[in-house]
Amino acid sequence: MKHKIVYMIVLLVLMACHSSDNTEHRGKKMQTMRVTNLDSLWISGDSLTGEGNFFILDSCLYLADRRVGTICGFSLEDGHLVSKELRKGNGRNELPSFMYFYPFRNKPNLWWAVDGSYVFYTYDRVKKELKNHGRMNFGWNERGNVDFDSPSWYGLMEMSDFGVSFTYLNDSSYLIPVNVMHRYIGNHASDQFRKGHIFGKLNSRTMSVERVFGRIPDIYHNRPTTFFDFFHYDMKGDTVYVSHAIDSLIYVYKYPETLLYTMGYEGTGVKREYTETYELMANYRSDVETVGMNTSMSYVPETGLLLRTMLTNGFTYEEGKTILQVYKDEDLVLETSMPDYFQYLGYYNGKYYGIRHISLDMEDGQMFFVLYSFRITRK
């Protein structure tokens, strides 16, 4: 009995010593669901360049075509072009240029855009009004000693190929994803993952980023990478889910940054052997073509499911093997292979939708986008 008491005391001391390092991991693997009715629809890309980003809203697939400055809507039912909004230019309802163009994740009738100089726009799709809010101000001119709690060391998160999400907090502020600006940190690179942040609060009236917050997980502390530092997030009320590009875990926070627990499992066949370095863009091409990465994550309030996609072994024009994971609460209830280059976009009227990330270019010069739809049902 005496030995048991001593053992319990030692165990409790060890648990106390490591409690700050060991976050609770929740969930189990239980394949109770499956993908059914997987279908594809080819959509003609004639007169479009295909350079830009896609999103799903209501009954339409939208392509924000960067080169022509137009937002084209295609019917989810038959792929026909049903709308064109905005155009390139400097007049009313014209965009000179943009890098990203998306609806706010929780306010779908208000769309936002950012150009290469961080000039910020919103578009009210009901009133058909485009508004230029001026340049986003991170305070770059105010940099002194490196202070990772200051917005002056950050910029908008890059890697738009796999989506960028803004959240409408209220009439005066937006939640935006941010990254440390590598070119500014010099010899302090080793601190960026230990002290850096992932979210910014943007004042929608002044365009100033007022603060930065949120954590960068330990995997980046231990195995640094300057390229695969992008992430995806979504929210359910004040619960925030975050999935980083090279991390098998999903981090669950109470907004704004209280870590509650982790969940999630590594995808089958996903290779994570990226170059560990603080050097900017080191081995960029070879890593992109050989390293698996998480490419989307989205919570579907209509079904209570959390969907995540991963490239298993890199991204080339010859191969883009993708798997889909589905979580119910914290449990992994489905993992399956999807068509090559599959990128999940959204849910509408009982179906889940995704797009082929690379267009199909025919020998006769025609270009097609491939839209996928499917259902998730119990086995």
Image (spheres, grey):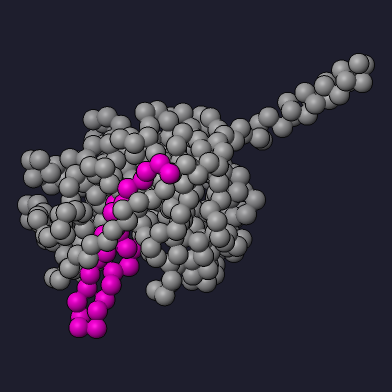
Query: Which residue sits at x=19%, y=44%?
Result: 58
Count all numbered tags in the image, as a single digit: 0
Q: Is 30 positioned to the left or the right of 8 in the image?
A: left
From the image, which quarter does the N terminus lie in?
top right
Image spot of residue 170 (x, y percent): 27, 29
Q: Is 288 positioned to the left or the right of 129 in the image?
A: right
In depth, the one of 218 and 106 nearer the eye is 106
Image spot of residue 345 (x, y percent): 31, 51
Magenta region, mostly helix, strand or loop? Answer: strand
From the image, which quarter does the C terminus lie in?
top left
Image spot of residue 125 (x, y percent): 12, 44
Question: Residue 295: in sight, yes or no?
Answer: yes
- The part of the image, by quadrant, that contains residue 100 is bottom left
Residue span colored magenta: 353-379
Query: Which residue sits at x=32%, y=63%?
Result: 356
Image spot of residue 374 (x, y percent): 31, 52
Is residue 378 a member of the stretch shown in magenta? yes
Question: Residue 174: in sight, yes or no?
Answer: no
Query: Which residue sits at x=16%, y=65%?
Result: 68
Query: Which residue sits at x=56%, y=50%?
Result: 266
